[in-house]
Amino acid sequence: MGKAVGFIIVSVAFFVSQINCQEAILHISNESSSINKEYCLVYNQSWTPLSQTLDAALQYPLVNMTSTTLCNTSGISPEVVKGKALVVMRGDCDFSQKAQVAHSLGATTLLIASNTLLITPSANDSEYAKTHIPLALMRYRDYLDAQQVFAGGMQVKLYAPLHSKIDASIAVMLLIAIVTVALGGFWSGACERDRLNGDVAGGGGGGGGGGGESKADSGELFLYSPLKVVIFVAMMCGMLVLMYFFYNVLVYIIIAIFCLASASALFGCLDAVMEKIGCATGRFSIRNHNFSVRSLILASLCIGIAVVWGVYRNEDRWIWILQDLLGIAFCLNFMKTISLSNFKICVILLSLLLVYDVFFVFITPFFTKNGVSIMVQVALGPDASGEKTQGNMVQVPAEPQAPTEKLPVVMRVPRFSALAQNLCGMQFSILGYGDIIVPGLLVAYCSRFDVWINSSKKIYFVSCCTAYLLGMIVTFAVMLLSGMGQPALLYLVPFTLITSAVVAGCRREMKQFWAGTTYEVLDSSREPLLPEGRTDSSVEGDIC
């Protein structure tokens, strides 16, 4: 059951493109008082660029024309609007027509009040050159609020602060990714060492990986057959497509599964830490049933965290902390539980998932009706329809709405540079669980191989972790330079696979690394962990 739960979560847990929002600020003041207030705007930077600072923005008096949609000049006197900013209602004609009418009347700025979803205003390429005044959308309810605050007339400025592309949230995301991968790999190697040491003490036989076609008693599951790997990836593709077509139903099933799986994973992680530091269990009996006080306390804590996340999962301000905590535990447990038996399986699995990631991010937009990739649509939910492949669209609700459900398959860290001016909604840096788990499985294999050859310097594990860190840095660098979200596996898979292969080649251990078998090391400076005479059959050891 646990393996099926993990499969369902990982099936949709891959990288999501980030939204390159084009949001601006409407600064309103009143000449008769020192009161000022700011509201959210949505604009098109390539169409009508705005000043980047408040001081550089020009100030104009605002004329209320919300009684019209301004599709023509009928009934409007140019003297009333000349040299002023206009606010009109959305509808009846396109944005470019409203802007041309406002410009012909002598207006300096056009604000379009909307009762529906705010979207980045756009037009045909031929219409862009005809618009010579700033144009932006605002919420109609914001304008009504401004009327109450500034009853004696309004002066407005429009500006779009330039947010640094290099946000501190990227560093936090990078830290989460590398620490999770390193801990998961180290945990997998430690379990392998405990299992082999326990087996040696028990006099058992068997090698550590190449022929492992059975589950260890610890609950670890080995992927050893190329055919099974292909079937595994094919099932992931099928699950993603099902989520695309039946999102509104399956999303609640995934959320329920995530709560159960992440609570169990968090319990496993915390229990392992308590065991490592020697925390007493404190047992008691009720009707001949033994209970551990430590386990009961940890179980209550983990279930409570999962329940709190489930109840408040749509609260953006702080719930991301719990989602990331549960996500880290889920990734760690998955990396410790699922073991790739040899480097050949690593190459097959990671290569297939690389193709899977690139196809569903870059290729599927050509087949979907709204031009959004299936990966983005599934991971961001139905609201992702406003994001095009160039990442230059944004949507902002005009009215308070019930939050749409999103799959818990990403790490989320708020963009710290945007927190101070969070008028349109919180912005997040996002990384899919799959970009941690998939390379993490290779890191875990390298960690176990270090155990099999008794490498005191953990050369394979350290090298693969370093390659993962460099791959993540390259991923973020390309994302920042291109302004588009990237399928991280496109960079992580080559970095980790090539680095691992180069290390094995330089150490002349490629044959053993490829097959995954334990063996005698001829170099006396690196004595093998296993004694002579051990075979390459799978090991059944003590529970880790």
Image (spheres, grey):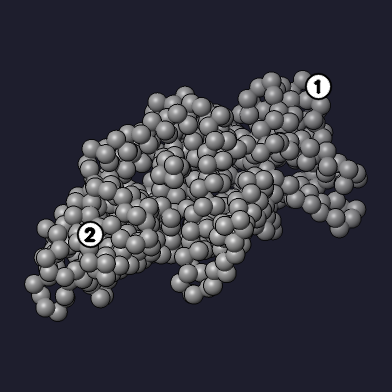
Report the residue at 14% width, 59% height from top. 535
Give the quarter of the image for residue 230.
top left
Residue 233 point in image, percent of width and height: 32, 38
Disc 1 marks which residue?
75
Circles 1 and 2 in contact, beta carbons < 8 Å: no
Residue 159 point in image, percent of width and height: 66, 50
Task: From the image, state whether disc 1 or disc 2 is nearer to you.
Answer: 2
Mark 2 closeness class: few <14, some 14–19, many ≥20 residues within 10 Å: many
- Vertical side of 91 occupied by 62: above or below: below
- Vertical side of 96 occupied by 431: above or below: below
Residue 298 point in image, percent of width and height: 58, 61
- In front: 50, or 417? 417
Amino acid type, callout 2? Gly
Residue 1 point in image, percent of width and height: 44, 42
Which label sits on residue 24? none
The C terminus appears in which quarter of the rendering?
bottom left
Q: Residue furthest left?
A: 522
- In front: 527, or 383? 527
Mark-to-mark CA distance, 1 and 2: 85 Å
